[in-house]
């Protein structure tokens, strides 16, 4: 069971409780489930009972109990607990979880770079307005990409005519003017560096990463370390993980085998990172925070390398390609696809050779 499946299951339980007149409250448009935080119980947690308690005029734990009774026994859910003031905590069934992981890998490979795109912002219309400053321009354009990936419509405007060098950074401004809906304030780049200066020193990809990786209120780090080809550079790690995944695919092709889903691969951190990707994209759009996506890509890259080191994707020596190799290759390709899709939304290239 994926997080999206679990969310729909809980939402269905809310509708059932309302239809049966056990719960008198408006049915929310969606129910959010999140991975349990350290020290919590189960695999996922949901706070919908706290959301419904006020309108229902019931204690949150009583609402949670009504919902628990309607999700217990659903295939894929092993255990449901109520914790704290009324949180629902879900432990997924182990056998079902393995099937869900395989299904998720297939989903990533089928949807490609659009894996994780959704309807979080469907029906919304945004106009993001920013001042004539390179970081504000890059952040506004990236936020609009994230919003559109979640179903929103909108345009980006600048208070003055845009800098001609912005186009080399992948920035497009739809119009100039002073509309009343500004983007959340971002801290300008140090010493007012121009797009041309940054492009000459760092290039487009490193410049965009340096502007987008920190949260909007933090200083943008635009040092030469962004160009370092090593583990200390998160941008290099993310792009190298993508390039390595593509290299594995090429080498597998030379050995005559393709991805498969014959076995569940024991790589919990990487599976969790892939499962979290749609939620991260929705959150980054909702909060207009591209840094959330950049940090998530670092998590995916680290999990990929841990998996890569622990589970050889390619046969060694006289070893023949097996079902395990095919399944590992599928997971490696899925990780590379998520990295490429995330970098694309940030406006950063994902080379196949690095």
Image (cartoon, rainbow, N blue to C red):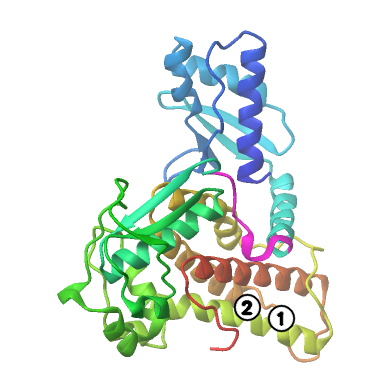
Quarter of the rendering occupied by the N terminus: top right
Q: Which residue is tagged 1?
A: 249
Q: Position of residue 155 (x, y in %)?
A: 44, 55
Q: Are marks 1 and 2 in contact (CB under 8 Å)?
A: yes
Residue 55 drawn above or below residue 326 = above
> Was residue 348 drawn as part of the magenta stretch in this picture?
no
| Whether residue 304 can be seen here | yes
Q: Is residue 248 above or below residue 208?
A: below
Residue ID at (39%, 48%)? 287
Question: Crowding near pointer 2: few (<14 within 10 Å), some, many (20+)?
Answer: many
Q: Is residue 285 above or below residue 113?
A: above
User: Residue 157 vs residue 73: left or right?
Assistant: left
The residue that mark 2 highlights is 245
Q: Position of residue 189 (x, y in %)?
A: 22, 71
Per the image, label 2 sits on a secondary structure element best described as helix
In the rendered structure, the answer to whether residue 92 lies left or right of residue 203 reads: right
């Amino acid at each position: 069971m994926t997080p999206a499946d679990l969310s729909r299951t809980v939402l269905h339980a809310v509708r059932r409780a309302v239809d049966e007149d056990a719960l008198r409250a408006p049915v929310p448009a969606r129910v959010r489930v999140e991975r349990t935080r350290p020290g919590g119980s189960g695999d996922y947690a949901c706070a919908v009972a706290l959301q419904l308690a006020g309108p229902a005029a019931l204690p949150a734990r009583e609402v949670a109990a009504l919902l628990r009774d309607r999700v217990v026994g659903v295939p894929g859910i092993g255990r449901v607990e109520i914790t704290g003031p009324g949180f629902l905590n879900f432990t997924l069934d182990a056998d079902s979880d393995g099937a869900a992981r395989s299904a998720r890998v297939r989903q990533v490979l089928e949807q490609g770079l659009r894996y994780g795109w959704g309807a979080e912002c469907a029906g919304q219309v945004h106009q993001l307005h920013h001042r004539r400053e390179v970081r504000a321009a890059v952040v506004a354009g990236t936020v609009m990409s994230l919003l559109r990936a979640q179903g929103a419509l909108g345009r980006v405007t600048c208070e003055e005519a845009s800098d001609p060098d912005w186009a080399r950074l992948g920035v497009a401004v739809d119009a100039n003017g002073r509309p009343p809906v500004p983007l959340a304030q971002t801290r300008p780049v140090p010493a007012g560096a121009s797009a041309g200066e940054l492009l000459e020193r760092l290039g487009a990809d490193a410049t965009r990463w340096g502007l987008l990786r920190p949260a909007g209120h933090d200083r943008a780090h635009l040092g030469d370390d962004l160009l370092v080809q090593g583990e200390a550079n998160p941008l290099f790690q993310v792009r190298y993980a993508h390039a390595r995944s593509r290299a594995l695919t090429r080498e597998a092709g030379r050995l005559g085998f393709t991805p498969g889903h014959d076995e569940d691969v024991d790589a919990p951190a990487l599976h969790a990172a892939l499962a979290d990707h749609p939620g991260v994209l929705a959150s980054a759009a909702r909060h207009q925070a591209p840094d959330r996506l950049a940090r998530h890509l670092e998590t995916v890259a680290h999990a990929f390398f841990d998996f890569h080191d622990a589970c050889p994707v390619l046969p060694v020596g006289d070893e023949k390609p097996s079902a395990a190799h095919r399944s590992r290759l599928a997971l490696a390709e899925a990780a590379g696809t998520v990295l490429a899709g995330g970098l694309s939304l940030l406006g950063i290239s994902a080379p196949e050779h690095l």
